[in-house]
Every structure is written in C-alpha cells, then in structure tokens.
Amino acid sequence: MMGTRDDGTRVVARYADGRMLKGRTHDFAPLKTQFHLSDSGNVTAQTTRVNLAELKAVFFVRTFEGDSQHVADNEVAEARGQGRRVRVTFNDGEVVAGFTMGFSDDKPGFFLIPADGACNNARIFVVRQAVRSIEWVAGPVTAVTGALAASGSRTR
C-alpha cells in the first residue's frame, strides 16, 4: 500500500505592517491565535510561528509564484459563487471581493472565496482587525426568484 505525502497547504501570510511570509501549514484554524509555516511543508522541518493578531490576511494560494501581470477583478455583483457577496477594504487600501459563508461579528476573521476565478488565491482568511470597511454587495435577481415572486409562490 502506498502512503500519501502531505506537504501542507500553501499560504502567504500578509502582515498588517506590510511584511509577507510564504510557506506551507498543517495547523491553520480560523479560531486559533497562531499557526506555523515551514518552507518545505514537512511536519518535521523547522517552522515559523505566525500570530494571527499581527496579520492582515492569510492567502491560500494555488502557486507561490502567482501572476504579477494579473489585474484583480473585484466586480462581485455579477460574479457567480456561493455565499454572501462582499467587498473588503483593508486598512492599507487593498481591496478584495468575493463570497463568504462564515462571517460573524464576534469572530477574529472570516474566509472569502475570491470573485475573480483567474486569480492565484483559492481562498483568503481576512483578519477583522486589519479591515477598514466591509461592503455587502447585492447580486442579480435570478429568473427563478422573479418567476416565484410573480406567481405568488413562497418557499419555507
């Protein structure tokens, strides 16, 4: 039987002060105050402790290289996805937009799935204390919703 190798999840930790740390993690959890990153992803390799309170966001990336020529598409109103549409402006002015299903005022952060399917970020954990504003964006009214309203039908 062949074993599987778990190199960890590729993340880029972006600090509120502008620093950035790339690595792999095995222990990120949204309610934990810290997690660890390693260069190789090997659980026995030397790791760096990352304190969530110092971060702006944790970007769960497809590749560490990314695409420096990519221009983010933050138009979330017409984008397709699951959850509430949201546009987030960080304290440093950076804007990300997408969908969230786990937002709560009493949590230290929330996951956002980018509206831009072509970007390098698979998901982003947004740290609330690094956010200047959160804008909830209305989405399009679907034909099904419109047809139900016209017929007087309701769902429970």
Image (spheres, rainbow, N blue to C red):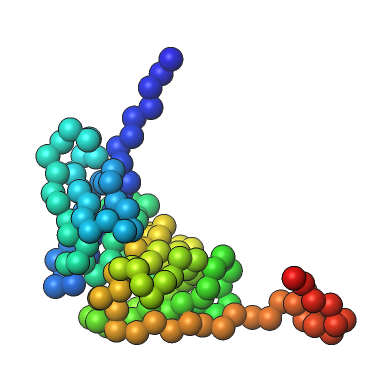
- Residue 53, given in percent of the width and then of the height, sits at 19, 66
- In depth, the one of 149 and 70 nearer the eye is 149
Image quadrant for the C terminus? bottom right
Q: Is residue 7 left or right of residue 51?
A: right
- Residue 40, given in percent of the width and then of the height, sits at 21, 39
- Residue 8, given in percent of the width and then of the height, sits at 30, 41
Which residue lies at the image location 34% right of the left edge and 84% below the top edge? 133
Which residue lies at the image location 49% right of the left edge and 69% below the top edge? 99
Q: Is residue 79 left or right of residue 67?
A: right
Residue 114 visible, this angle: no
Image quadrant for the N terminus? top left
User: Is residue 147 shown above or below 43?
Assistant: below
Which residue lies at the image location 18% right of the left edge and 44% below the top edge? 38
Which residue lies at the image location 12% right of the left edge and 39% below the top edge? 46
- In depth, the one of 100 and 96 nearer the eye is 100
- Residue 152, given in percent of the width and then of the height, sits at 85, 82
Tally of numbered discs: 0
- In depth, the one of 154 and 136 nearer the eye is 154
Q: Is residue 63 left or right of residue 38?
A: right
User: Is residue 24 shown above or below 99?
Assistant: above
Q: Give the quarter of the image for residue 92.
A: bottom left
